[in-house]
Amino acid sequence: MTDKEFTRRLVQTVFTVATVAILIAVLWEAREALMLIYVSALIAMGFAPLVQIIERRSGARARIPRWLAILVIYIAIVVVLLLVALAVVPPLVAQAAALWARMPDEFDRFQRFLIRYKLLRGPITLAEAVQNAPSGSGSNAVGTVLVALSTLVGGIFGFITILILSFYLLVEAKSMFEYVSRFIPPGRRGDVANAAREAVVKVSAWLRAQFVLAGVMGTFAAVGLFLMGVPYFYVIALIAAIGETIPIVGPVVGGVTAVAVALSVSPKLALIVGAYFLVLHQLEANILVPKIMERRVGVSPVAVLVALLIGGALWGLVGAILAIPTAAILSIIVDQIVADREVRLQRVR
């Protein structure tokens, strides 16, 4: 190898490494935007079969426009969210008002408990408790509120972005796929199309499985809380059903809400409700989620649990939510690679 050729390869290597490093840095800086795009793509894939069903011909010559079929789904989702809000918000406001009215009595009862076990010397008022709070807590509270408001605004903006982007992805899905197919070798376009269709089927199955899990957990929560005489049991059941779509944290939120409402009745009832939701959470995490996802999505229980752990470790709550559909898509890619390798080995033989 001559010096000139060595220098040329060295320059090419350095340029390649620098390009890859810059690309990784750019992707890392844009990770939040990329996550919004990925979530939008998953939502579009999940609703794609339903859009196709709606836009099919139903005795009419003209097919329903795709944008209208998507709009029908969006309107249905908004209506459901409004109905849930109307069912949940008024009881929550009433419960919060009742709890606020009972706060002095509950505070006194808690003080008597502490005094009885010699954890507190004497009774104090709420005003004295606030006055004796650690210095700087006021500024910390203001900072916490500002951070919470900023997070809320960012979450609302992200939610609206996902809705708009998923809408356009559904509308332009066919033309976008045809454009991307131009960069794929003609002999591989059929395999890529089959893999894309299979990915859409699996992501849609995952979305349906989420609704099934939410319905099952909401029903069990409603029946159990009704039999135990917990007030606003239907509100708690709705919160538990919605929380079921959020791995790890969602069921905990539903259980804490149920215990808090039961505590307003009696500590004994709160203990029973807590034990009931603990059992439900164990059944959901170790039996329902793996089995339902295996049957509907085609991902084994071991892969489901591993995906949830890895997704949660890499990206927190969002990573846990997206872990199962991502594992399903990765399984399709791996199967395609293995199938191609087997075909090549057969040709060599």
Image: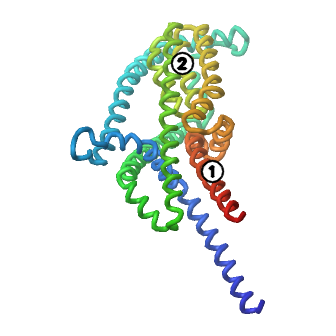
Sequence order check, earlier mark of 1 and 2: 2
Q: Is residue 5 above or below residue 240?
A: below
- Kindly state the secondary structure of the residue where label 1 is placed: helix
The residue at the point 50 percent across, 52 percent down is: 194
Q: In the image, residue 183 lies at what x, y percent?
A: 49, 68
Q: In the image, residue 333 lies at what x, y percent?
A: 60, 53
User: CA separation, marks 1 and 2?
Assistant: 44 Å
Answer with left or right where residue 6 lies relative to residue 271. right
The residue at the point 53 percent across, 21 percent down is: 257
Q: The C terminus appears in which quarter of the rendering?
A: bottom right
Residue matched to label 1: 335
* Mark 1 neighbour density, 10 Å: few (under 14) some (14–19) many (20 or more): few
The residue at the point 61 percent across, 47 percent down is: 331
Q: The N terminus appears in which quarter of the rendering?
A: bottom right
Q: What is the number of the mark on residue 258?
A: 2
Residue 132, visible in the rendered structure: no
Comparing labels 1 and 2, the label whose residue is closer to the camera: 1
Name the kind of residue labelled 2 in the image: Ala
* Mark 2 neighbour density, 10 Å: few (under 14) some (14–19) many (20 or more): many
**58 and 135: which one is in front?**
58
Q: Is residue 108 above or below residue 147?
A: above
Answer with left or right where residue 105 lies relative to residue 278. left
Residue 3, visible in the rendered structure: yes
Image quadrant assignment for residue 179: bottom left
Q: How is the image coloured?
A: rainbow
**93 and 254: which one is in front?**
254
Image quadrant assignment for residue 116: top right
